Image: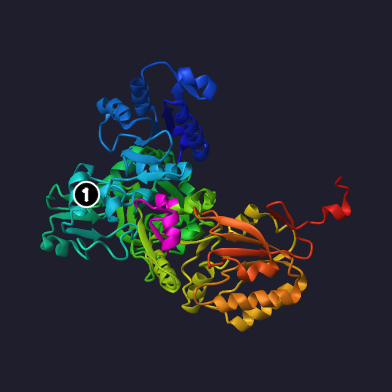
Amino acid sequence: MDTAKTAIIALSRNGITLGHKIKTGLGGAVLYAPQKHAESAGADVAFSQPVSQIIRQAFSQYRQIVLIMASGIGIRALAPVIQDKRHDPAVVLLDEQGNFAVSLLSGHLGGANKLARRLAVICRGQAVITTASDVQHTLSPDLLGKEYGWKIQNPENLTALSGLVVNGQPVGIYQSAGENLLKGELAPNLKRFSSLEELYKAHCPGNIFITEQELSRNLSPLSLIYRPPCLVVGIGCNRGTAASEIEQAVFDTLSRFHLSCLCLSDIASVDLKSDEAGLREFARSEGLNISFFSGSELAGVDVPSAPSQAAMRCAGTPSVAEAAALLCSKGEIIVPKQVYRPNITVAVALKPAVMPAEPSAGWLYIVGTGPGNPDHLTPAALQAITDSQVIVGYKTYTDQIAGLINGKELISTGMTQEIQRAEKAIMLALEGKKVALVSGGDSGIFGMSGLVYDILRERQITGLKPKVISGMPALVSCSSLLGAPLMTNFSVISLSNYLTAWTEIETQLRACAATDLVMVIQNPTSKKRGEIFALACRILLEYRRPETVVGIVKNADRPEQEYWISSLGNLAEEDIDMNTTIIIGNSYSYRWGESMVTPRGYANKYQLV
């Protein structure tokens, strides 16, 4: 996101305060505010004109506009200058509290939907996305291939074809070039065809063509033609050949072989031509990449045409045009060497369109969502959730971040279904989806990270590299609520015997209790495990005094949060449940008022009074 191209326009003091927060979150942007507020509020641009005039000026100057005001003000100001989604900037509208970020204009092509989701993260609000394809989680024709440089030859048909997609009408798809972005399962109304003949016979109401080929028949207004940058032209030429001659040779070749010039991405030649003015001028004027290869590199390439004695004599290789096209494209020759006049040879290669048999992986974030309050989500966790298309998680945890999930696919399940959630997240990522598997606290501490790696290892899935996003563990939040109980070495033990045998837990519990480490106890009890907690309390009393300070926190950072200080002797009688974290002090821990403290040792080394 180029935030230098973003304008933030706010009207009220509260709105200006929010504008500063957004500007910081985006890492730039220009903040506009009324002159009566601007000086005290530190806006970048103060204005005294009517806000409608400022909004219209910004509409022609910026690619992204954030309006912090009532929707009516923004809509009335924009009405006279709106053109269409191919030209209008992205516009997102927020209330002054940042509760809702509404994608108003250019949701896809302009990026307003993406911006709204980013602003919702910054403001801890909710993105409001109304684009039908986003709501239905189906294909967005105006975004297809955009990030890979695909061009739409007939964008005037976008609206009509998009209407077919979101209304469930059959749409045929033929692809012969470009990245395989439509791998995996498609919506039921989207049908792939392996040839143009099959597609034409199907008589679908609408069609999508992703191809380098020029289409001979007249197409209906319900067809879209995508042109991936997939053609490479190898060129050999005499010294001093003009750019206009090269242009004519290239475009005449493409036309004669029914190839779209919109798919042209690169030209290539021998390195002896790296200073050829005509070649470089042609590449520059057409916005093409240009590559050069040594004679020895070209000589090692197998080509379909007979060797050229002239090329061997001048460049040390039997082929320039074909060999350069093949090396640059890493694909196949679709137009063998063509000779234009005596001074230019041209060959065309197609970049590979065939993807590996195993689908390329998407993203899999394993995100720690913290103890429960969305305010304690880390910036990295917020960004991972924002960037993901699909959120997978235990319902309690997905409910806690509901405001960040709007417009995304949500897969939420109950307790004891961890394996199913992990499998689903992995499967979706392997299909190319951007997935966030959310886990309470930190996903690497009694969370979902280990299970994901277990599945990948057991099933030998090597094509997916999960990224673990840290979250605030519950023990950190509990420690803060209690005071300073974890100022020195400590251990963490879960009493849950769901996956670990009680005999193993008991061994660890006794070992830690004997060391005088501060102990954090998680998952202490449940309706089915009451006897385990009672037994654990008796074991701890074998090693520590009954008056040992104990801190107890229930539902940390959740609305029903409560915490208090007790003692080890009274612990078995306390109101403990599975959402409780217990911190058992060491022999030096003490209670100070309503706080629990474990001294680090400063008083032993320094004079504190």
254 displayed left or right of 171: right
Tell me which segment is drawn in magenta. Answer: 386-407
Residue topped by disc 1:
162
Residue 182 placement (x, y as % from top left): 30, 60
| Residue found 75% across the figure and 75% down from its top | 543
The three-letter code of the residue at mark 1 reads: Ser
Pick the quarter of the image with the C terminus.
Answer: top right
Q: Residue at coordinates 34% horizontally, 54% vertically from top-left?
A: 230
**Residue 89 visible:** yes
- Judge whether 46 appears above or below 417 on screen: above
Rate crowding at label 1 as few (under 14), some (14 to 19) or many (20 or more) other CA atoms within 10 Å.
many
**Residue extending farthest top:** 48
Near-viewer residue (408 or 584): 584
Q: On screen, 514 above or below 274?
A: below
Residue 485: percent from the left, percent from the top?
70, 58
Instruction: Find out whether residue 402 is within the magenta segment.
Output: yes
- Magenta-span inclusion, residue 286: no
Q: Position of residue 53 (x, y in %)?
A: 34, 20
Q: Is residue 453 left or right of residue 179?
A: right
Q: Is residue 546 left or right of residue 410?
A: right
Question: What is the quadrant of residue 513 in the picture?
Answer: bottom right
Residue 601 as seen in the image, left or right of residue 462 = right
Query: Which residue occupies 48% across, 75% down?
Result: 455
Quarter assignment of residue 136: bottom left
